[in-house]
Amino acid sequence: DQQVKQNSPSLSVQEGRISILNCDYTNSMFDYFLWYKKYPAEGPTFLISISSIKDKNEDGRFTVFLNKSAKHLSLHIVPSQPGDSAVYFCAASGELSFGAGTTVTVRA
Amino acid sequence: DGGITQSPKYLFRKEGQNVTLSCEQNLNHDAMYWYRQDPGQGLRLIYYSQIVNDFQKGDIAEGYSVSREKKESFPLTVTSAQKNPTAFYLCASSGSSGLEKLFFGSGTQLSVL
């Protein structure tokens, strides 16, 4: 049973606009969430994280929002750049649960 | 230069053959993990180890085996019992706190001949 779900397999956005990626989880005991970025044939790299005691964490163009009551988190990328084209995974604490990923394509 | 190294980058397996994927880290991390990625799918946990000489099954451990004799090394053997081994395999490591981010290797693409 998948505890972390990314229901949108793909997202296409124009360069300069905002990308919003969503992630839902079922286990309210998760206390830390992370986003990873992955290019083809490479390993994922850490992007940004958020503790469950916060509702927002920002790092440059990337912001993660956490809504604990809805068991939902989202990643905002603004402005989107061509180099942001990749697969994005959300993960829950302990690194044992990953979402299926969302493929982002940034159009020039 | 600290990091996590997987080898080989590409591997081919014949029917009935066991193959071993290497994973080495020099980050002094206690925890190591193996994930499998299939085309268009996310990462699924095969095995993980939080300390030397100890490891636990993940969601899809059947047909795989691991060992953790050294802190730096966590090899994965894909046995002949794994009927659908073609996938991209990722090894990762992290500190022991459980809240630390994973560092991933560059992956091994395994294909069946």
Image (cartoon, coloured by chain):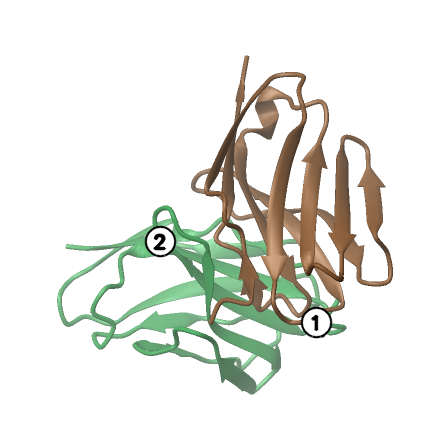
Give percent across and percent down for residue B85: 27, 63
Q: Which residue corresponds to the image point at 51% horizontal and 83% vertical from the top-left?
A: B56
On whether disc 2 and disc 1 are found on a single subunit, the reply is no
Q: On the rendered structure, is A40 left or right of B12?
A: right
Q: Position of residue A104 (x, y in %)?
A: 53, 33
Residue under label 1: A28
Decide if residue B2 is in sight here: no
Indicate which disc residue B98 carries.
none
Above or below, comparing residue A89 to residue B102 in the picture: above
Per the rendering, the colour in which chain B appears is green
Residue A47 occupies quadrant: top right
Element marked by disc 2: loop
Q: Colour of chain A?
A: brown
Side of B100 where A56 appears, left or right: right
| Residue at x 60% of width, y 83% of height | B52
Q: In front here: B78 or A73? A: A73
Badge 2 density bin: few <14, some 14–19, many ≥20, Cα 10 Å: few
Chain letter of the residue beneath label 1 in the structure image: A
Position of B96 with respect to A40 (left or right) is: right
Tell me what residue is drawn at x 53 percent, y 51 percent.
Answer: A6
The residue under label 2 is: B38
Residue A36 visible to the viewer: yes
Q: Secondary structure at mark 1?
A: loop
